[in-house]
Image (tube, helix red, strand yellow):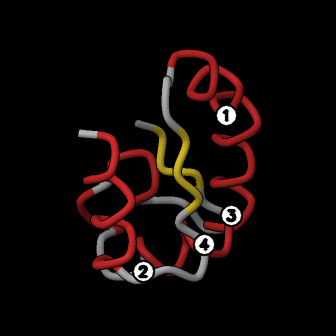
Amino acid sequence: IFLDASVETIISHLQNERNKRPLLKECENLNKKIEELLSTRYEKYRNVSDILIDINGKNIDEVISQILVYI
């Protein structure tokens, strides 16, 4: 399952977790770094995922409900 999210959504989810993420810990421009990571990884994630769930604008309960449909 690939949880698809925009750069904005990813950043909002990472705001309090940056220190736990080695690639983001010392990063000065979080937006740029996330864009760079997505540009190199997005297609790979899509290609290996059987299921894609768009999580933009959804809360955790909505995402869980969508995941449960598939398992």
Q: Amino acid at mark 2?
A: Gln
Residue 35: x, y in percent?
74, 52
From mark 3 to mark 2, how far is it between C-alphas?
14 Å
Considering only order in the chain, which callout, 2 or 4, is on the residue closer to the N terminus? 2
Q: Is residue 10 above or below residue 8?
A: above
Q: Secondary structure at mark 3?
A: loop
**Mark 3, residue position:** 6
Label 3: how many Cα within 10 Å (few below 14, some 14–19, many 20+): some
Q: Secondary structure at mark 4?
A: loop
Q: Amino acid at mark 3?
A: Ser
Q: Residues within 10 Å of mark 1 (few under 14, many from 20)?
A: few
The residue shown at (54%, 60%) is 27
Q: Position of residue 57 (x, y in %)?
A: 58, 82
Which one is earlier in the sequence, the residue at label 1 or at label 4? 1
**Mark 4 or 3, which is nearer the eye?**
4
Q: Which of pointers 1 and 2 lies earlier in the amino acid sequence?
A: 2
Going from N to C along the chain, the mark reached first, 1 or 3, is 3
Q: Which mark's residue is nearer the viewer, 1 or 4?
A: 4
- Could you tell whether 68 is left or right of 9 in the image? left
Mark 1–mark 2 Cα distance, whole angstroms, equals 21 Å
Query: Which residue sits at x=49%, y=24%?
Result: 50
Q: Which residue is mark 4?
A: 56
Q: Which residue is mark 1?
A: 42
Q: Are marks 4 and 3 in contact (CB under 8 Å)?
A: yes
Residue 24 figure quarter: bottom left
Alpha carbon of mark 4 to alpha carbon of mark 2: how far?
A: 16 Å
- In terms of sequence position, does the residue under pointer 3 or pointer 2 come before the other? 3
Q: Is residue 61 above or below residue 65?
A: below
Q: Which residue is mark 2?
A: 15
Q: Mark 4, residues whose alpha carbon is within 10 Å: few (<14), some, or many (≥20)? A: some
Q: Type of residue at label 4?
A: Asn
Relative depth, front residue between 44 and 60: 60
